[in-house]
Image: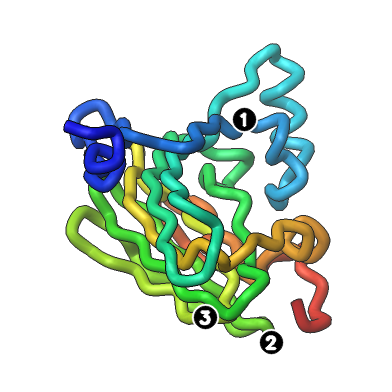
Amino acid sequence: VSSESSSRAITLDLKNFVMTPATRKREVRLSELKDYFSDPEAADKILSSGRDPVVYEYYEYVVEESAGHLSLGLTIIYPGKVGKEYFMTRGHFHLKPAAEFYYGIRGRGMLLIQSEDGRVEYVELRPGVIGYVPPGWGHRTINTGRAMFVFFFAYPSDAGHDYGIVKEKGFAKIVIEEKGRPKVVDNPKYTSSTI
Ligand SMILES: [Fe+2]
């Protein structure tokens, strides 16, 4: 088997949640994400106890960051909360109007999407469900369960990522646990100007 043909077959190990090959593997810990949560003091409390848990990790396979290609990936969000807010990804907008999809593999979670003028929609993701992000909409995924939340994603390789706008203004809605269940509520820190 030539290396060329093997890199055209991407394998998802659905037992250990590993994607092979991958051009990038990354772990994102709470210390890196704390300002994205609505209650950074709750994050500080966890961190000051000496813990810095991995909130999520992902594998990505990028053939080439050029128009026409697709980038593929596998994300694992661990179960946990910061205050009432569930563990989640940072979230981003694409620099170009490029769509993306998320295919739920394990556990349960939510895909939160937000239009440039601040409209928010969400999709409950569970194994076998595909969540679709239309071009131009920001997106974040949240683990609303008590086990690992795992999903596969794909998007155009030249989409680009804008994380800054999310860091600055956040999403208009957050997902919290209330009476043991996930609830989508207004983000108290969200600035109402268009994102
Ligand atoms: Fe994306």
* Badge number at residue 29: 1
- Pick the front one: 107 or 132: 132
Which one is closest to the eye, mark 2 or mark 3?
Answer: 3
Q: CA distance from mark 1 to mark 3?
A: 28 Å
Asked if the residue under mark 1 is in contact with the one under mark 2, i.e. CB atoms within 8 Å, the reply is no
Q: Say if 52 sits above or below 85 in the image.
A: above
Residue 175 seen in this snapshot: no
Residue 101 locus on image (x, y percent): 37, 66
* Badge number at residue 117: 2
Residue 141 locus on image (x, y percent): 48, 56
Q: Which residue is mark 3?
A: 135
Q: Residues within 10 Å of mark 3 (few under 14, many from 20)?
A: some
- Secondary structure at badge 2 equals loop
Residue 33 locus on image (x, y percent): 69, 40
**Residue type at the position of mark 1:** Arg
- Secondary structure at badge 3 equals loop
What residue is drawn where x is 56% and y is 66%? 158
Disc 1 C-beta below 8 A from ligand 1? no
Which is more N-terminal, label 3 or label 1? 1
